[in-house]
Image: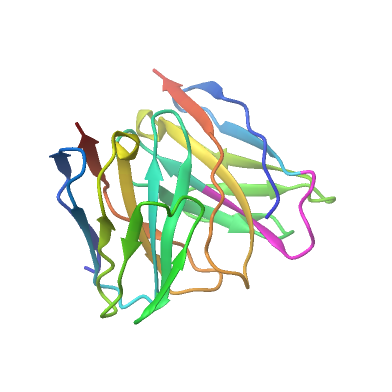
Protein backbone atom coordinates (compact mmCIF):
# COMPACT_ATOMS: atom_id res chain seq x y z
CA UNK A 1 0.00 0.00 0.00
CA UNK A 2 1.18 3.51 -0.83
CA UNK A 3 2.45 5.84 1.85
CA UNK A 4 0.87 9.17 2.70
CA UNK A 5 2.25 12.50 3.88
CA UNK A 6 0.24 14.88 6.05
CA UNK A 7 1.13 18.06 7.92
CA UNK A 8 1.63 17.31 11.62
CA UNK A 9 -0.77 20.00 12.82
CA UNK A 10 -3.29 22.60 11.67
CA UNK A 11 -5.54 25.20 13.25
CA UNK A 12 -8.98 26.28 12.10
CA UNK A 13 -11.50 28.79 13.46
CA UNK A 14 -14.82 27.44 14.64
CA UNK A 15 -17.49 27.74 11.97
CA UNK A 16 -14.98 27.87 9.16
CA UNK A 17 -14.19 25.12 6.68
CA UNK A 18 -11.25 22.96 7.67
CA UNK A 19 -9.20 21.74 4.72
CA UNK A 20 -6.82 18.90 5.49
CA UNK A 21 -4.32 17.98 2.77
CA UNK A 22 -2.80 14.59 2.08
CA UNK A 23 -0.09 13.67 -0.38
CA UNK A 24 -0.06 10.15 -1.83
CA UNK A 25 2.14 10.55 -4.88
CA UNK A 26 2.88 6.81 -5.19
CA UNK A 27 -0.77 5.73 -5.18
CA UNK A 28 -1.62 3.03 -7.67
CA UNK A 29 -4.74 2.70 -9.79
CA UNK A 30 -6.56 0.25 -7.52
CA UNK A 31 -5.87 2.02 -4.24
CA UNK A 32 -8.58 3.95 -2.44
CA UNK A 33 -8.07 6.97 -0.20
CA UNK A 34 -9.55 6.61 3.29
CA UNK A 35 -9.91 9.18 6.05
CA UNK A 36 -10.35 8.36 9.72
CA UNK A 37 -10.15 10.58 12.77
CA UNK A 38 -9.31 9.91 16.37
CA UNK A 39 -10.67 12.13 19.08
CA UNK A 40 -8.53 12.12 22.18
CA UNK A 41 -8.42 8.72 23.92
CA UNK A 42 -11.14 7.25 21.71
CA UNK A 43 -11.06 4.62 18.98
CA UNK A 44 -10.62 5.84 15.39
CA UNK A 45 -13.77 6.82 13.54
CA UNK A 46 -14.33 6.36 9.83
CA UNK A 47 -15.05 9.58 7.92
CA UNK A 48 -15.06 8.96 4.19
CA UNK A 49 -13.29 7.18 1.34
CA UNK A 50 -12.98 7.49 -2.43
CA UNK A 51 -11.18 6.21 -5.51
CA UNK A 52 -11.05 9.04 -8.04
CA UNK A 53 -14.32 10.93 -7.91
CA UNK A 54 -15.05 13.52 -5.27
CA UNK A 55 -17.17 12.18 -2.44
CA UNK A 56 -19.46 13.79 0.10
CA UNK A 57 -21.31 12.46 3.11
CA UNK A 58 -22.89 13.89 6.23
CA UNK A 59 -19.52 14.39 7.87
CA UNK A 60 -17.20 15.68 5.18
CA UNK A 61 -16.19 16.03 1.54
CA UNK A 62 -13.23 14.37 -0.11
CA UNK A 63 -11.57 16.05 -3.06
CA UNK A 64 -9.11 13.90 -5.03
CA UNK A 65 -6.93 15.54 -7.69
CA UNK A 66 -7.21 14.32 -11.24
CA UNK A 67 -3.81 12.62 -11.11
CA UNK A 68 -4.80 11.11 -7.71
CA UNK A 69 -1.48 12.11 -6.18
CA UNK A 70 -3.11 14.18 -3.47
CA UNK A 71 -6.43 14.74 -1.77
CA UNK A 72 -8.13 17.14 0.61
CA UNK A 73 -10.60 16.37 3.34
CA UNK A 74 -13.03 19.21 3.93
CA UNK A 75 -15.04 19.68 7.11
CA UNK A 76 -17.47 22.37 5.91
CA UNK A 77 -18.34 24.01 9.24
CA UNK A 78 -15.82 22.98 11.85
CA UNK A 79 -16.92 22.77 15.47
CA UNK A 80 -14.89 22.36 18.64
CA UNK A 81 -15.84 18.68 18.63
CA UNK A 82 -13.92 18.23 15.38
CA UNK A 83 -10.64 18.70 17.24
CA UNK A 84 -8.89 15.38 16.62
CA UNK A 85 -6.06 13.66 14.79
CA UNK A 86 -7.02 12.99 11.17
CA UNK A 87 -5.47 10.07 9.31
CA UNK A 88 -5.24 9.72 5.54
CA UNK A 89 -4.69 6.13 4.41
CA UNK A 90 -4.50 4.48 1.01
CA UNK A 91 -5.25 0.81 0.48
CA UNK A 92 -6.31 -1.73 -2.06
CA UNK A 93 -9.93 -2.70 -1.51
CA UNK A 94 -9.63 -6.29 -2.65
CA UNK A 95 -6.81 -6.94 -0.23
CA UNK A 96 -7.31 -7.45 3.44
CA UNK A 97 -8.07 -4.54 5.71
CA UNK A 98 -4.52 -3.90 6.81
CA UNK A 99 -4.64 -0.16 7.16
CA UNK A 100 -1.17 1.39 7.29
CA UNK A 101 -1.43 4.34 9.66
CA UNK A 102 0.88 7.34 9.61
CA UNK A 103 1.11 9.96 12.32
CA UNK A 104 -1.84 11.97 10.95
CA UNK A 105 -2.67 15.68 11.27
CA UNK A 106 -3.61 17.12 14.62
CA UNK A 107 -6.48 19.52 13.85
CA UNK A 108 -7.26 22.08 16.52
CA UNK A 109 -10.50 24.02 16.20
CA UNK A 110 -10.30 27.38 17.96
CA UNK A 111 -13.29 29.35 19.27
CA UNK B 1 -27.58 -1.01 18.31
CA UNK B 2 -24.68 -3.13 17.11
CA UNK B 3 -21.36 -2.32 18.70
CA UNK B 4 -17.81 -3.43 19.41
CA UNK B 5 -16.64 -3.53 22.99
CA UNK B 6 -13.28 -4.07 24.60
CA UNK B 7 -12.51 -5.14 28.12
CA UNK B 8 -10.96 -4.22 30.37
CA UNK B 9 -10.58 -0.51 29.55
CA UNK B 10 -7.52 -0.27 31.78
CA UNK B 11 -5.13 -2.97 32.95
CA UNK B 12 -1.92 -2.97 34.95
CA UNK B 13 0.08 -6.16 34.96
CA UNK B 14 3.54 -7.35 35.90
CA UNK B 15 6.32 -8.36 33.58
CA UNK B 16 6.12 -12.04 32.66
CA UNK B 17 2.40 -12.45 33.33
CA UNK B 18 0.00 -13.75 30.72
CA UNK B 19 -2.69 -11.20 29.86
CA UNK B 20 -5.79 -11.53 27.70
CA UNK B 21 -7.67 -8.57 26.27
CA UNK B 22 -11.22 -9.17 25.14
CA UNK B 23 -12.95 -7.88 22.01
CA UNK B 24 -16.61 -8.56 21.25
CA UNK B 25 -18.63 -7.31 18.28
CA UNK B 26 -22.32 -7.69 17.59
CA UNK B 27 -22.35 -6.76 13.89
CA UNK B 28 -21.69 -10.33 12.79
CA UNK B 29 -18.66 -9.05 10.87
CA UNK B 30 -16.30 -11.56 9.32
CA UNK B 31 -13.14 -9.49 9.78
CA UNK B 32 -11.63 -8.55 13.12
CA UNK B 33 -8.35 -6.79 13.87
CA UNK B 34 -6.09 -5.90 16.77
CA UNK B 35 -3.92 -2.77 16.67
CA UNK B 36 -1.62 -1.15 19.16
CA UNK B 37 -1.00 2.57 19.41
CA UNK B 38 2.00 4.06 21.14
CA UNK B 39 2.06 7.66 22.28
CA UNK B 40 2.19 10.10 19.37
CA UNK B 41 2.03 7.42 16.70
CA UNK B 42 -0.47 5.85 14.37
CA UNK B 43 -1.89 2.37 14.82
CA UNK B 44 0.11 -0.76 14.03
CA UNK B 45 -1.53 -4.06 13.16
CA UNK B 46 -0.87 -6.97 15.52
CA UNK B 47 -3.14 -9.80 14.32
CA UNK B 48 -6.25 -10.13 12.21
CA UNK B 49 -8.89 -12.71 11.34
CA UNK B 50 -11.15 -13.13 8.33
CA UNK B 51 -13.47 -15.62 9.97
CA UNK B 52 -13.87 -18.43 12.47
CA UNK B 53 -10.69 -20.48 12.88
CA UNK B 54 -8.73 -18.01 10.72
CA UNK B 55 -5.91 -15.93 12.22
CA UNK B 56 -3.06 -14.02 10.61
CA UNK B 57 0.01 -12.17 11.80
CA UNK B 58 0.28 -8.46 11.31
CA UNK B 59 3.17 -6.04 11.37
CA UNK B 60 4.02 -6.41 15.09
CA UNK B 61 2.82 -9.89 16.10
CA UNK B 62 5.78 -11.09 18.19
CA UNK B 63 4.70 -11.82 21.75
CA UNK B 64 0.98 -11.81 20.91
CA UNK B 65 -1.52 -14.47 19.89
CA UNK B 66 -5.21 -14.55 18.97
CA UNK B 67 -7.84 -17.20 18.48
CA UNK B 68 -11.21 -17.03 16.70
CA UNK B 69 -13.62 -19.67 17.93
CA UNK B 70 -16.77 -17.74 16.99
CA UNK B 71 -17.75 -14.75 14.87
CA UNK B 72 -18.22 -12.30 17.73
CA UNK B 73 -14.95 -12.57 19.66
CA UNK B 74 -11.23 -12.14 19.00
CA UNK B 75 -9.30 -12.22 22.28
CA UNK B 76 -5.70 -10.99 22.24
CA UNK B 77 -3.22 -12.78 24.51
CA UNK B 78 0.15 -11.51 25.61
CA UNK B 79 2.00 -14.72 26.41
CA UNK B 80 4.56 -13.14 28.74
CA UNK B 81 4.00 -9.42 29.17
CA UNK B 82 6.98 -7.12 28.63
CA UNK B 83 7.38 -3.41 29.38
CA UNK B 84 7.64 -2.77 25.62
CA UNK B 85 4.03 -3.92 25.34
CA UNK B 86 2.78 -1.00 27.41
CA UNK B 87 0.43 0.62 24.93
CA UNK B 88 -3.18 1.33 24.01
CA UNK B 89 -4.79 -1.57 22.20
CA UNK B 90 -7.66 -1.17 19.74
CA UNK B 91 -9.88 -3.85 18.31
CA UNK B 92 -11.75 -3.29 15.04
CA UNK B 93 -14.13 -5.15 12.78
CA UNK B 94 -15.59 -4.83 9.31
CA UNK B 95 -17.49 -6.96 6.87
CA UNK B 96 -14.83 -6.81 4.20
CA UNK B 97 -14.28 -5.15 0.84
CA UNK B 98 -14.62 -1.40 0.90
CA UNK B 99 -16.70 -1.17 4.02
CA UNK B 100 -15.59 0.97 6.91
CA UNK B 101 -14.00 -0.50 10.00
CA UNK B 102 -15.55 0.06 13.42
CA UNK B 103 -13.21 0.45 16.35
CA UNK B 104 -13.60 -0.27 20.03
CA UNK B 105 -12.81 2.32 22.67
CA UNK B 106 -9.42 0.84 23.43
CA UNK B 107 -7.66 -0.89 26.32
CA UNK B 108 -4.83 0.93 28.04
CA UNK B 109 -2.32 -1.70 29.17
CA UNK B 110 0.58 -0.90 31.48
CA UNK B 111 3.25 -3.52 32.12
CA UNK B 112 5.33 -2.82 35.23
Q: In this rendered view, identify the residue nearer to me: B110 or A34.
A: B110
Residue in the picture at 49% in, 47% down: A36
- In this rendering, would B21 be left or right of B55? left
- In this rendering, would B94 be left or right of A1? left
> If the image is split into quadrants, where does the N terminus of chain B sit?
bottom left
Percent across and percent down for residue A47 are 48, 51
Residue in the picture at 22% in, 35% down: B110
Q: How many marks?
A: 0
Residue A59 sits above or below residue A18 on the image:
below
Residue in the picture at 58% in, 40% down: A74
Percent across and percent down for residue B39 are 39, 29
Quarter of the view holding residue B79: bottom left
Residue B32 sits above or below residue A53 on the image:
below
Q: Which residues are magenta?
A: A25-35
Residue in the picture at 50% in, 38% down: A86
The colour scheme of the drawn protein is rainbow
Which residue occupies the extreme right position in the image? A67
Which residue occupies the extreme top position in the image? A111
Q: In this rendered view, identify the residue nearer to me: B80 or B3.
A: B80
> If the image is split into quadrants, where does the C terminus of chain B sit?
top left
- In this rendering, would B40 be left or right of B85? right
* Residue A30 magenta-highlighted: yes
Percent across and percent down for residue B36 are 38, 45
* Residue A91 magenta-highlighted: no
Percent across and percent down for residue B100 are 47, 63
Amino acid sequence: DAKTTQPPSMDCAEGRAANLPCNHSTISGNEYVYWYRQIHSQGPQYIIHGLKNNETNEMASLIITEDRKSSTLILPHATLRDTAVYYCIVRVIVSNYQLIWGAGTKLIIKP
Amino acid sequence: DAEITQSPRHKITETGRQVTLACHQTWNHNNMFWYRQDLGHGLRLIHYSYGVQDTNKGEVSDGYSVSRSNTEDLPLTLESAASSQTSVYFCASNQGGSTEAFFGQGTRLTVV
